[in-house]
Every structure is written in C-alpha cells, then in structure tokens.
Image (spheres, rainbow, N blue to C red):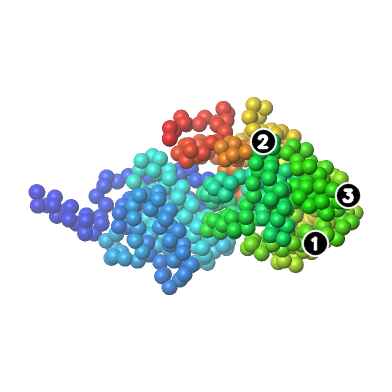
Amino acid sequence: MKNFKHLIAALCTLTFVHCEKPIETHLESFPLIPIASTMKETGNAFFIKSKTILYFDEQDASLKRSATQLKKIWEARSKQEISFNEGIPFMHSKIELIKKDFESDEAYEIKILKKKIQISSSNEVGFFRAFTTIDQLLRFQNLSNQNHLPTGEISDMPKYGYRGAMLDVARHFFTLEEVKKYIDLLALYKINKLHLHLSDDQGWRIEIKSWPNLTNYGGSTEVGGGPGGFYSQEEYKELVSYAQERFITIIPEIDLPGHTNAALASYPELNCNGKSPELYTGIEVGFSTLCADKEISFQFLDDVIREISEITPGPYFHLGGDESHVTTEKDYITFINRTQDMVFKYGKIVMGWDEIQNADLKPNSVAQYWADAKNAKAAIKKNAKILMSPAQYAYLDMQYDSLSPFGLHWASYINIKKAYDWIPDQLVDGIEEENIIGIEAPLWSETISNFEELSYLAFPRLLGYAEIGWSKTDQRNWEEYQNRLIEHGVLLDSLSINYYRSPKVPWKEQRQN
C-alpha cells in the first residue's frame, strides 16, 4: 500500500494529474466589470501553479509583446513565475495565445480548461482587453484566497469604440504620477481614451517651446491660489507612452477662444487692448477671449496645435469651444473655422464641445454633447459624430448628493444608480446609435486638488460608465450590477483607492490595508 501511494504521487508529478479534491466553480457568477458579452461555465478549476508555460508564435513580434504583458500581469497577481515556450506541454499547465479574426479589434475569447487557458484575439489591443479580464479574475481569486480559476469560456467585444474619461488638469494641476495612477485604473476597466483638459483660465499645463511664458507664468497658479504646475513636452510624451502601453489614447484639449485667461495673462499681444489681465484663481467662466482682430492670435494657435500634434500620436485634437460668452458670434465662427483647418493640416480629427456646431464643421468632426441637445443634433446634420457626455448623467464632478464634500451640482446630483442607469442612444430623440462614437465621463477639478479627492468623485461611478461604453445594453441591469459593484468595492479597498461608499449600497466591511 505504501508503494502504491508513492506511485500515485509520482504519477501526479510526472503527468501533472490534479490530485486535489474536485472543486465546484462558477465562472458566470464572477463579478467582472464591465460585464462580458458571454460567459459559459463548465464547473471545473484551473489550478494556479509554478511551471506554467506560455505558448505563442515567437516569430510574431506583436504576439511576443502581448506575451510579455501577460507574463507581467500573471506573475504580479499569482506570485508564480511563467516561462515562454519551454518544457513538455502535457507535463505542465499552459497558456496559449492564438491569433484569429474577430469582428472588432478589441474582441477576444478566453477558454479556461482544467490544464490549459487559451486566449484568442486578432491583435495586441484585443489581447490586452483579454488580459484585463484575466487580471480581474486573478485579483478576485486572491481576495478570496483561492489558488485556481473557474473553467469556462468568455467571449467579449465592446459596444462602442470610444470609452473615455476626461481629467481637468488646468483648474487644479495633477502630477505625472497621479495621472499614471488614474491611467492604471482606467485600463483595468477597459476604458481606452483619456482626454486631458490642458488649458483654462486658471492655468496652462503643457509646455509650448515657441511660447515659453505660457507655462513659466500662465502655469504658475491654480484655483485657490496654489502653486499650479505644468508638463514639459518630455513629461507629456512619457504620459502618452505610459497610456499607449495600456492601449489608452491621450486626447489633448486646448480650450479656445474662451477659457483663455492664463494665455492672455502670459502674452499681452493676444489681447485686443494689448494688456495682460491678472492671473485668475477663481471658478467663474465665460469672461475671457482671444482677439480675433489680431493675426498673431492665429499664429499662436497654429504653433500650439503644431507642437502638441507632433507629440500626440492619437487621432484627435480637442479645441474646446465651450462657454465663450464674451466672444461675438462672428469671431467665434472665425476661430473655430480657422483652427479646425490647422488641426486638419497637422493630421488630426477635430473634437470640441457641442457649441462648435455653430461653425462650419468638417465632416467626421466630433461634437461632444454635454449641455445642449439642439447643438448635438445640429452637428449631426453637418455630418459630425457625437461623443456622449451629458452633464446631468456623466459629469464626474457633480456631487453624489447634498452631503458630498467635493463637487458641484449645477447640472444635477448624480448618485451611483443615476450614473449607471441611462442609455446613450435612447437619451435624446434624434441622436441615434449610428451617430454616436461612444461616451466620456469628464472630471472638472474646481473642487479637487489631489488624487484622494479625484478618486472620491471618480469611483465608483467610473465603473458604471465603463460598462455603459463596453457592454450590450440588454445585459445591463442595476440590481445585478450593484451586486458586482459591491465586490469591486472590496477590490478598490485592496488597492487603497478612496471612493464614495453610498449608504444606499450594502457594501462589504472595509478592508484594512
């Protein structure tokens, strides 16, 4: 009998037979956010062990890059090393990366078997979206002290190609490390765009080498009179690269012709009267404008758009265009028409807040609907696309309720349920699914000045926006989503992320870190 036991142990080692007691698992009940298109469980377990081998075609450079990304995620979460294309396949658990055609670049499939995980996509971005799903699965298994993944199949693809967040770094400045931390969280939830509001009345935050005083002086303060700050072009490129590694596109915004006091204070020649106003540290809007009567205003904008476009590989350039209350209609149209020509000249697609429809929009421009549905519908008639950011549903800087310590409420109070429970293509008659490129959740920074405050307003609402952008409408249900959100509260606790624990949600006890 003793020799028989030794024989069984040897067989388990040599042939990698799982001798653990069978475990019943339920893949379909895993709290993924955003929810996948389909999840089918098979009720077994893939045990996480050392000597897992990752197989892929090493002649394919993009697959090798993907494999390197998965290795980093797997080892960080499982605490087990992973090797490339080594050993004898039947003797080890294994992961395979396989290229195949899908309807969407971001689509993927994951098949988890007892001894093998097979991940399929058509390209690197699709593999990365699959890896974020694996990342969530591993994180939740760690939180429950499990050493296995549930078996089954996941098939997934996004509803919208554009799933974005906007961060206002102009009213209050956020450091490189704070923005990177935000990018990491966006990537975990399959958000693929980060729109940076880089200039406003209170500060200019991106170095323009041909106009250095924009940052030397115009970036020297912020709301409330703090020290402000700015990104050098090298730092900005570092941010762009960091985001690219996580398949997030940075979209720069230079707001014009209003919201320009920081620029006007930096260069008196941009003012019609030739005098510089004082730097501004309040939160009022609509009082500033570039001077349309001076050609130097347009040389200035050409330089700004050129320099930023040269260091921004993404397709979009955002011109702002909102709340320009002291600019005449004629001058406003002149500014938007001329600057969109510059954007086109430097190889970018024009984006702007919904007011830009008042100009002669180029086809395929993007109007960001935030306030006036009439503007959005007028933009559609000019062959523009619509990015949905309705302030009363999607603005992350709106207070959750009257007791919220941060945020404003000029558009609405937005509790967690309201943030989740709306449908972009059913919100406004005349804005149909074919008109919409996606959604974006803007976070204006009048009332926040550090990452703790940022995360309080962004989380957990941002998870709902991620699901609105990714998942099919008929999959979304508030009660079911809330159950998954509760589990993500535990995950956010484990990451030491400050978030709003709504008293209307039965959160689990907060973890001590």
Quarter of the image with the C terminus in it: top left
Q: Quick one: label 1 or label 3, which is nearer the N terminus?
A: 3
Q: How many marks?
A: 3
- Res. 513 visible in picture: yes
Quarter of the image holding residue 476? top right
- Which of the numbered marks, if any, corresponds to residue 273? 3
Element marked by disc 1: helix
- Return the residue nearer the eye: 55 or 38: 55
Q: Residue at x 40, y 40 (%)?
A: 143
- Res. 443 visible in picture: no
Q: Quick one: label 1 or label 2, which is nearer the N terminus?
A: 1
Callout 3: 10 Å neighbours few (<14), some, many (20+)? few
| Spot occupied by residue 281 in the image (x, y as percentages of width and height) | 73, 39
Three-letter code, disc 3: Asn
Viewer-nearest of labels 1 and 2? 1
Q: Which residue is mark 2?
A: 447
| Spot occupied by residue 127 in the image (x, y as percentages of width and height) | 49, 60
Mark 1 to mark 2: distance in Å? 34 Å
- Return the residue nearer the eye: 412 or 90: 412
Q: Which residue is mark 1?
A: 299
Three-letter code, disc 2: Thr
Viewer-nearest of labels 2 and 3? 3
Q: Residue at x 88, y 49 (%)?
A: 273
Callout 2: 10 Å neighbours few (<14), some, many (20+)? some
202 sits to left or right of 506: right
Element marked by disc 3: loop
